[in-house]
Amino acid sequence: MSKKKKHLKLLKGEKFMYVIVLLLLLAVPTVNVFSKALLSETNIKTEKLRSKIEKQKDTNESLQMQIDELVSMENIQKIAKEYGLSFRSDNIIEANN
């Protein structure tokens, strides 16, 4: 009697399943790396924006201090005196934004 080798035949569904599993094993790490790269890029952009916001806040505070200084009553009186003007306190209207 001769020994015959039996070949294991895979069904079509099994072949499809093996292909899907193999694709998933390759795709999951790739997608993971890609998503982490996108997250890192987004974090960098966020930090740059935060830095710009902080700089703008500092600029705004400085400008507000200058505005407060320029609209002070002492400054108004000084400028009025320079130009030989006088004012009545009931004529002064303060404009607030």
Image (cartoon, rainbow, N blue to C red):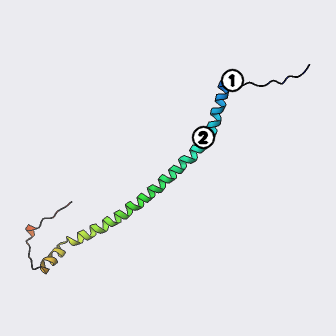
Kindly identify which residue carries mark 2. Answer: 27
Q: Position of residue 81 (x, y in %)?
A: 12, 79
Answer above or below: position of 74 versus 18: below
Could you tell me residue 51's position as x and y percent? Answer: 42, 61
**Does 37 appear above or below 10?**
below
Q: Residue furthest right?
A: 1
- Residue 30 is left or right of residue 4, and the answer is left
Residue at 37% of width from left, 60% of height from top?
A: 53
Which residue corresponds to the image point at 21% horizontal and 72% vertical from the top-left? 70
- The front one of 45 and 57 is 45
| Mark 2: amino acid | Ala
Disc 1 is placed on an element classified as: loop
Residue 21: x and y in percent read: 64, 34
Amino acid residing under circle 1: Leu
Horizontal relation, residue 31 to residue 73: left or right: right
Question: Which one is nearer the viewer's eye here, 81 or 22?
Answer: 22
- Mark 1: give few (<14), some (14-19) or many (20+) Cα within 10 Å: few
Residue located at (63% from left, 40% from top): 26
Numbered circles on residues, count: 2
Check disc 2 and report its element: helix, strand or loop: helix
**Residue under numbered circle 1:** 11
Image quadrant in which the C terminus is located: bottom left
Precedes in sequence: disc 1 or disc 2: 1
Between marks 1 and 2, how big is the CA–CA gap?
24 Å
Quarter of the image that includes the N terminus: top right
Looking at the image, which residue sits at the far top? 1
Q: In which quarter of the image is residue 32?
A: top right
Q: Relative to 37, does residue 21 appear above or below in the rendering?
A: above
